[in-house]
Image (spheres, rainbow, N blue to C red):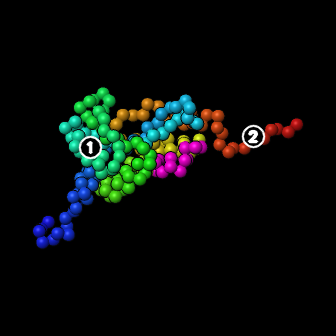
Amino acid sequence: MGGANQQERLSGTEAERWFLAGLIEGEGSLCASIKYHPTARYGVVVDPEFFIYQHVTGRSLLERARRIFGTGRIYPKPGNPKVLVFCIDARRSLRERVLPFLFRYVYPFSAKKQQITCFAEIVEALERKEHHTPEGLARIVEQAYALSAGSKGKERKRPLQEVLERILRGHTPNIAPPSSPER
């Protein structure tokens, strides 16, 4: 980039965003945790979350992410206090801040395109309140399992079928009952 062409230079803020996009590609994680909850309508809650991990020496990078997103919290990773976690789990912040950022800065170049798309579908389905029906919640859970299928993290605690059975127990899709034999 020559000094004669000043148009090629990014503003400091824009450069920071592109830098953060690279950090997210390498150290970021999109998750949709599935928790059994006794007071939930169908016994299951789906919580989408966005994380960036860094060694404690890289705290300034996580502080930068928090400043750019304007939200989130930083805390020690449970079981490994030398690793810090930057987390955004508020659905509104995910929808209004994280997803637009991911689609603008990360998605075009990412190896995680499928994960980003799946995560966005989960967040949007929850915003549309699809989880208020058993079929809708079951679709969201299936997407959550698809989101983690290619990840390098730990496997899900419960098989998908077990979670779906919990959601759909006592619920029968619109199937006509068998006709009774005539006498």
- Find residue 26 and name its label: none
Quadrant where the image shows the C terminus: top right
Q: Which residues are magenta?
A: 121-133
Disc 2 marks which amino acid? Pro
Tell which residue pokes out farthest to the bottom in this image. 4
Question: Looking at the image, which residue is at 30% across and 51% down?
Answer: 68
Question: Looking at the image, which residue is at 31% across and 54% down?
Answer: 106
Disc 1 marks which amino acid? Leu
Instruction: State the residue position of label 2.
Output: 178
Magenta stretch holds residue 79 = no
Horizontal and vertical percent position of residue 142? 49, 42
Tell which residue pokes out farthest to the right in this image. 183
Horizontal and vertical percent position of residue 162? 52, 32
Gap in angstroms between the C-alphas marked 2 and 1:
59 Å
Quadrant where the image shows the N terminus: bottom left
Instruction: State the residue position of label 1.
Output: 62
Horizontal and vertical percent position of residue 94? 41, 48
Q: Main secondary structure of the magenta part?
A: helix
For the residue labelled by badge 2, is the local secondary structure a helix, a strand or a loop?
Answer: loop
Magenta stretch holds residue 124 = yes
